[in-house]
Image (cartoon, rainbow, N blue to C red):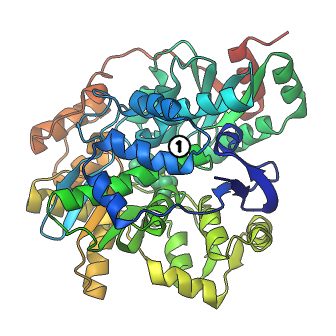
Amino acid sequence: MIYTSTRDSSVKVTASEAIAKGISSEGGLFVPTEIPRLESSDIERLCSLDYIGRAKEILSLYLTDFTEEELDMCVNGAYREGKFSSDKVAPLYRLNDKASVLELWRGPTCAFKDMALQLLPYLLTVSAGKTLKDTEIVILVATSGDTGKAALEGFKDVPNTRILVFYPVDGVSPMQKLQMTTQQGENVSVCAIRGNFDDAQNGVKAIFTDREIEKKFKENGLAFSSANSINWGRLVPQIVYYVSAYCDMVTDGKVKQGEEINVVVPTGNFGNILAAYYAREMGVPIKRLVCASNRNNVLTDFLTCGTYDKNRRFYCTASPSMDILISSNLERLLFILSGYDAKATAGLMKELSQGGKYSVSDEMLAQIKQVFSAGCCDDVATAETINEIFKDYNYLIDTHTAVAVRVYEDYVKQSGDGTPTVIASTANPYKFSKSVLSAIKENVESKNEFSMVEELHAFSGKEVPPQLAGLKGKQPRFTRVADREEMTRVVLDMLNIND
Ligand SMILES: *Cc1c(COP(=O)(O)O)cnc(C)c1O
């Protein structure tokens, strides 16, 4: 299978080149030039396999230059027994007759980023072995919380890799901060940046394109790569769980094979929902994809009106992993819907970078509306939904999942669509204890993070994931706080190439 760039049709690379590079040199994203199809007999066969078996089959359709042995090694390494707190890896929880929740947070860091970031280090090292001989890969990450920890956990002690995570010093939750600063592993480093997430992100981008550093890196046998969701190696593992969820709906008797489902996804960078779109294009019987946003509802407007406009106020919400105004992976959808037209896609992206805004044609909007519905809700509705789901079903959801549940309820009310539905659940509620606790309990007594965790546990009776409970009292390993201007220095220090 050949991959091309969303901005340059002359680009033709293999899967491993796409994964090792992360992003195409002119700034476009790598996309496979065709989408493999699953026949109903294929889906029937996948239904009889476990998660690892399903992952191997689906990944082999996309990563065609990986050998069977390589894929076996990658998938077994990522999803082997004990890594996820469910033997199904991503289990379905039946909420009611119509709706099931897909628990994507059973991995080591309790957020859905683990589903891809447990696998990416394996995919990346195999890819680098094919394309960049004798090179150590340096992963630089700017994070607003969940990606940083999941990437650290995925890459810790992976041979021939180093990972360095930058986070905004006051921009992550106390639990997220402690998760990162106590990270174990010989090849990891974490540094706080005085500034916000954009400062950290811009600093990382500046390092990626710094010619001096590139030279130093080459001399030392090093190369940069990316672990964020612009890398195809992060997107492809996410397709697997939508196919697998459909299989589980069939084997659990919630739908007959061939019967359609809807999928609802709480969305930020448009990566998770794009993976669901790929599953649908592969032939999984998905009727509609419902895109759920918080108060930063730039995608709701785009998917309903066809104009993407990031010139608007940015809100800090109770679902911070969705506080985003530029959804990078939307570029891949625009490219596919334009009929793989790189020139048209590059044009829209140029409008976005210059004026912060673009509009698509009426034809494209009609195509979008055939597949996507969209909705949004604010923090008050988010809290109400956490409370309602806890009272009605004795089930505890986090703030991001609550946005999805609320948008699903609104969608059903407006459309009357009674199709069986899978709602993606993206984080364990204890990652956002303060918001979740105050949503279900009137007088919150606790003042600090771990007393809130305990109060939430006492009140809800829900188990605290041991990997979060175990952080209590732990001493941080990484305490460095740097200015944005010092980030290059921090990278060179970490790599010991300061001459
Ligand atoms: C990253 C994240 C999201 C958003 O996912 P995208 O792929 O960026 O759309 C939603 N919820 C949680 C908890 C996340 O960490």
| Front one among 296 and 205 | 205
| Front one among 241 and 368 | 241
Quadrant containing the C terminus in the rendered view: top right
User: Residue 272 placed where, x, y %?
Assistant: 46, 56
User: Residue 243 placed where, x, y %?
Assistant: 36, 57
| Front one among 135 and 410 | 135
Q: Residue at x 13, y 65 (%)?
A: 96
Which residue occupies the extreme front position in the image? Answer: 41
Q: Residues within 10 Å of mark 1 (few under 14, many from 20)?
A: many
Which residue occupies the extreme bottom position in the image? Answer: 362
Relative to 62, is 7 on the left or the right?
Answer: right
Q: Which residue is mark 1?
A: 144
Q: Residue at x 49, y 29 (%)?
A: 69
User: Residue 257 placed where, x, y %?
Assistant: 24, 67
Residue 105, by quadrant, is: top left
Above or below for 73 versus 28: above
Residue 314, by quadrant, is: bottom right
Q: Is residue 320 visible?
A: no
Relative to 455, is 342 on the left or the right?
Answer: right
Question: What is the count of numbered marks?
Answer: 1
Query: Element at badge 1?
Result: loop
Q: Is residue 199 visible?
A: yes
